[in-house]
Image (cartoon, rainbow, N blue to C red):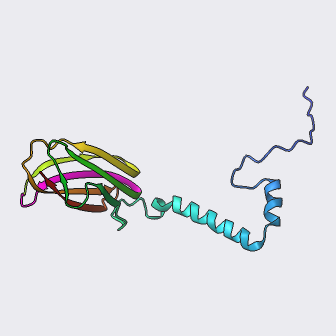
Amino acid sequence: MMAWVSSKYEPKSTNFLLPTKSEQRLLANLPMKLRTMLASLGAVAMLTACEDIFEGGSMQPDGSTPSLTINNPGKNQAITAVGGLRVNITAVDKDEVNYLEFTLKGESAEKAVLNFDTKPGKKVVEFDTTLNISGIAPGTYKLQVAASDKRTNLSTQEVTVNVK
């Protein structure tokens, strides 16, 4: 035969969406404006996190292009082929930077002398490398950097460099 033991212990709530009794007392003592503001912030955070659900999971471009900055080389920077070309960029996107493409072309050339890409898959990307350009002729070149996100929104930046 089993005996039931009665206890005054009340287990804490396992439902993380409902406040505990102490949290309820604390909330009851807050001014109404502050409670309204906290509830609004919570709702905004939940709705923002569910953005893809409300968009039906659409991966169509949404007009929010990645922010792209070429930190180095500077505009019309003079470099030597022996020293290489230091490339430093920052790319930021609310979804994530899905693809970065780097192209170096002569000023009037159609074909790139250097072309490579990377797929970082992060919201904030700091990319820093030095490219070996020892085989290219002196002259004026354009470095073009393109960044796209998972929705195929595209940003491009371009800078001119002078190879000595």
In percent of width and height, residue 78 lies at: 18, 54
Q: Is residue 159 magenta?
A: no
User: In percent of the image, x 67 and y 66: which residue is there?
Assistant: 39
Secondary structure of the magenta portion, mostly? strand
User: In percent of the image, x 30 and y 50: which residue is there?
Assistant: 88
In percent of width and height, residue 155 lies at: 29, 62
Left or right of 124: which side holds 118? left
- Camera-side residue: 6 or 132? 132
Classify residue 84 by image quadrant. top left
- Camera-side residue: 22 or 106? 106
In percent of width and height, residue 153 lies at: 31, 62
Q: Residue furthest bottom?
A: 33
In percent of width and height, residue 160 lies at: 18, 60
Count numbered badges in the picture.
0
Left or right of 41: which side holds 155? left
Classify residue 132 by image quadrant. top left
User: In percent of the image, x 24 and y 56: which residue is there?
Assistant: 145
Classify residue 41 by image quadrant. bottom right
Residue extent of the magenta highlight? 95-109
* Placement of 29 over or under 146, stated as above or below: below
Left or right of 52: which side holds 33? right
User: In percent of the image, x 38 and y 61: which residue is there?
Assistant: 58
Could you tell me which quadrant the N terminus lies in?
A: top right
* Placement of 129 over or under 46, stated as above or below: above
* Placement of 50 over or under 79, stated as above or below: below
